[in-house]
Amino acid sequence: MGEQREDLQRIVSTLANKKDEIVNFIDILKQTIRNVQVNSSNVFRELDKEFDALHSVLDEMKESMANTIQQERTEKIQALNNQLGQCSSALESSEELLECATTILNIKNPMEFSKAARQIKDRITACPAFRICLKPTISDNMSHLMVDFTLERHVLQALKFLPVPKVPEINTAACLVADNCVTVAWKMPEEDSRVDHFVLEYKKTDYDGLARVKDEQPWEVIDYVKDYVYTLSGLKFDKKYMTVRVQACNKALAGDYSDPVTLETKAFVFGLDDTSSHLNLKVEENYVEWDPTGGKGQEKAKGKENKGSGASPKRTSASRSAAKGCRDRFTGESYTVLGDTAIESGEHYWEATAQKDCKSYSVGVTYRNLGKFDQLGKTNSSWCIHINNWLQSTLSAKHNNKSKTLDLPITDRIGVYCNFDGGQLMFYNANSMELLYAFKTKFTQPLLPGFMVWCGGLSVSTCLQVPSVVKAFQKSVNGLNSSTCSLYSVPVMPIESSHC
């Protein structure tokens, strides 16, 4: 009976998963149909555009040739008209001289005839009819009428569709996820000189399976990538995975997308637990700021509320359990706020940036048992870097109520690296990635990020991966002997442990 129930449960679970896959595939098919309709319309538009462009070129060529022919016709007609005018003038002159010569032949007086004959002879000698060319100076053939589009016609008749580019292949071995950047590399299955550019798309997700159509963020698009590799930088790694795909494009159209590839982009994601913060701290998302009036104002309002209701000002166990973090607020001089996510294993990294002119702040980690009056670094279950900019500037490492002043430049940006399983806690100058201090111990309870601030504000940067420089450095100290609680100075040379 029990085995049959388990078998049936497995079958039901498998069937449910298969149903989800089919539903997702149906959504993909519907989306593909919509894409086909959109893409076919785009192709029609591009086809009209290309042929309109071709017609435009031919019309321009026709107009240019017609202008040339018109100009040649005008020039030839003008030249022929000039020659025609010259001939007409010579003809009129010849007719006049002929008429005069005929008249002179009828003269009977020898002396008059002789005189008139000499005059007509001189005129005939100077007559234009004897100097004019009786051949057209211009040919009637048009020199620019030699147009033969036979070759071009064959070329146009041989036109074919520009082939769709092949599908790129993402080279997973060459892809790299580091320092909150994702480098994606791909290649073409065969060389194609007609590929003009690539389109890279990506989306964040919390699973490494196939991309879903519904209930997912839209694809982020990086267009006109000219190379076969692209690095996405400035990312917020608030999801565990990133799915990427690539398509190739030529001058006319785009090919199909490559098979999506999912890359792991796991990073430490947490927020500030405002239910744990001191009343003099104002918490907004990942920013905490000292507010000297916050506690008084809230306590006054709380006192009026208690007075009117007659209820005890103490929080009940029920309200405490309902509050985020399930703990009391910090009070007294412990101006502290904790993160809302505990570290129980693995390697993690985050940063805190101090507001300009912040007088005092601490950045560190603690077990959950940090008391509401306790300060970071003053208990055996908390570790921190403390920066004091009041009266004098000091940088110190604190743990178990012990403090070690560090002879290093003050920084406004602290990076925290925690290797829970390896017992490593390192603080960095996040601007230069210089190691400030390193603790090595054996963590026996989950850790919470902790922040103390007085007279100023802190901005916490989460969703960060462990930087490459930190990974490289922490390998060099992996051989250190762990102890129940050890405090180390800046490890310029191999660190020696000292029991607290």
Image (cartoon, rainbow, N blue to C red):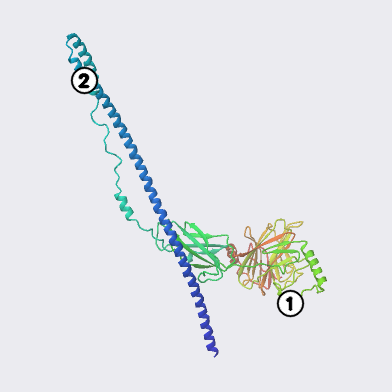
Query: Which residue lies at the image location 62% right of the left edge and 73% below the top edge?
Result: 345
Q: Amino acid at mark 1?
A: Ala
Quarter of the image for residue 387 reads bottom right
Q: Which mark is residue 386?
A: none
Q: Quadrant of the C terminus?
A: bottom right
Circle 2: element type: helix
**Picture quarter containing residue 382?**
bottom right
| Circle 2 residues within 10 Å: few <14, some 14–19, many ≥20 | some
Q: In the figure, 402 relative to 121: above or below?
A: below
Q: Is any atom of residue 259 visible in this view? A: no
- Asked if residue 7 is positioned above or below residue 175 in the image, the reply reads below
Earlier sequence position, callout 2 versus callout 1: 2
The residue identified by callout 2 is 98
* Picture disc at residue 318: 1
> In front here: 257 or 193?
257
Tell me if residue 489 comes above or below residue 85 in the rendering: below
| Of 162 and 26, the residue lying toward us | 26
Q: Which x, y percent locates residue 498?
A: 69, 69
Does residue 50 appear in this view?
Answer: yes
Q: Quadrant of the N terminus?
A: bottom right
Left/right placement of residue 33 relative to residue 151 reads right
User: x and y percent of residue 90 in the render?
Assistant: 25, 24
Tag 2–tag 1 contact (CB < 8 Å): no
What residue lies at 23% left-to-right and 16% top-to-bottom? 122
Give the residue type at disc 2.
Leu
Rendering coords of residue 486 (x, y %): 68, 70
Foreground disc of the pair 2, 1: 2
